[in-house]
Image: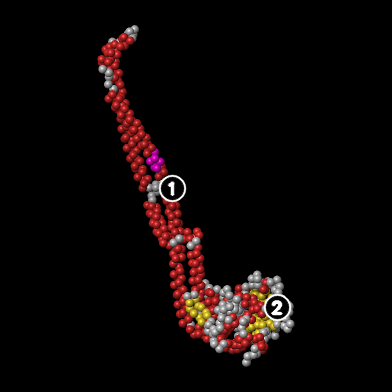
Amino acid sequence: LMIHRIFSSLAGFKNLDFHSGLNVLIAQKEAGASDKQTRNRAGKSSLVEIIHFLTGADAGKESLFRSSTLADETFGLTFDFGGETITTERSGKEKSKIHVEGTTFLKGKDRISNSEWMTLLGEKMFGLHSVSGEGRTPTFRSLFSYFVRRQSSGAFTTPEKQAGMQQTYDFQVALLYLLGLDWKIAADWQVVRDKEKTLKELRKAAQQGVFGTMIGKAADLRTQVTVAEARLKEMRTRLADFRVLPEYTVLEKEADDLTRQINDIANANVIDAGAIRDLEAAVHSEVPPPLNELEAIYAEAGVSLPSIALRRYDDVRVFHESIVRNRREYLYGELEAAKNRVLARDREKQQLDARRAKIMSLLRSHGALEQYSKLQAEASRKEAEVEALRQRFIAAEQLEGTKNELDIERNRLTRRLRRDFDEEEETLSAAILAFEETSERLYESAGSMVIDSTTNGPAFSFPMQGSRSKGIKNMQIFCFDMMLMRLCASRGSGPGFLVHDSHLFDGVDGRQVISALKVGAEMAEELGFQYIVTMNEDDAFKEKIEGFEIRNHVLPVVLTDAKEDGGLFGFRF
């Protein structure tokens, strides 16, 4: 498996032909070139970008291939793929379409979408057709980027990451998959992290602003829910016992009328009671004047009225007595009439009271349809209030209790990872020994790869003498990548080629660079993979190492930034 050719429709592009084993694309510094002409713009890293572009990488607005100079140009790659040698082409203008020739996998088609192309690459290179599961899964782009590291993504910082901003779950899932371990454990770890992130945000929101008021404390809400549910239960009982009286309104009006009539009767009786008292008092005080007083009055009248003929005294006395008698009879009649009116009203009041009592009893045991509807509406409102309180209570409990559950889940996943390490000890040992073997070829004191099971998932570390220096750190990445190539070769997976940008060798001693290239060439020949390296022609080329001549692996095309057309694209951007 190897890359045969990289080409472009761009007129000045320097097409590259590759062979098996080690391929070195160099950038020279021409004689007489100024110090500013550093070869950094010769196009070494652009080769890596082209390979990614042709294997499905995203081509956003800032992509090199969508620039006004290159958007209409086509770039191509001929390489071994799934037992066939195929050619694929893509342009920035039609970034979502891939042109493919020489493969039977497309069943007669020669153009597919970029997403379909990545799916096909993932199936044939890494066996991703068998990958399934919920949540995070290994992706072709994540796995492939370990074999063609990009400086623009920050891939030369630490061995376990192929991008500086690569998320923890992404490199854990990818590396467990590449190492042949249970990648689903890492995926499940990310589920825990997602929940913890949500929990953290909720806790932060619950401690401030309106949201905190909306949720509250679980203890307080438990009391509120209990009280509200009890009141709702009472309301439901009232609804169950409620009996609707169709003529409720009519009877209610009649009861009101009866009350008014009874009040009117009571008021009338009060008036008559006063009249009775006055009449009884008048009866007892109605006494005729003595006869001697009548005689005196009569005599006085004769003296005072001598010219008027007066009746006889006896006639006057009889008349006076009849007036007194008639007055008493009148008072007695009025008194009796008043008493009879009171008695009649009392009888009527008793009848009205009886009717009102019957109506009130009926109204107390029944209700109007309107009242029932209002009670139902109130019950519905109360149910909504209780449900809202219950949801707040659940949210509060989750905020206060989920942290413990997530800690438990982390510990469970840690045990699961350790168990997987124990069960796959042979697989894990093969990876560790592959890393150490490559390290031993470079250094007297071999470096190591340590894979630990922590409460945050698998952790990778690379203890090595002098590992604080940037050069040593870069060689750790070299050893790590060679370890991946050995594992893939043993399983018949992976792209079949490894590409290292010149940035991998930044800060590395020249002799160490030549040693690494010698190891890479030997491993490529031993394991049958292709190793492509871009680098500057500098002090490393002056170094001599027994059994290895770097110039035997240098490609015919040489890049330079010393002149306008010396770079990979044939012009300067």
Q: Which residues are magenta?
A: 251-257
* Quadrant that contains the C terminus: bottom right
Any part of residue 482 in sight? yes
Q: Mark on residue 465?
A: none
Identify the amino acid type marked 2: Lys
Depicted 243 relative to depicted 285: above or below: below
Q: Residue at x 62, y 92 (%)?
A: 546
Depicted 215 relative to depicted 265: above or below: below
Identify the amino acid type marked 1: Glu
Q: Which secondary structure dominates the residues rendered in magenta?
A: helix
Q: Residue at x 39, y 40 (%)?
A: 256
Q: Secondary structure at mark 2?
A: loop
Residue 268: x %, y % from top left:
35, 32
User: Which residue is labeled 1 in the image?
Assistant: 370
Q: CA distance from mark 1 to mark 2?
A: 93 Å
- How dense is the environment of label 1, judged by Cα within 10 Å: few (below 14), some, or many (20 and up)? few
Mark before the other along the chain sequence, 1 or 2: 2
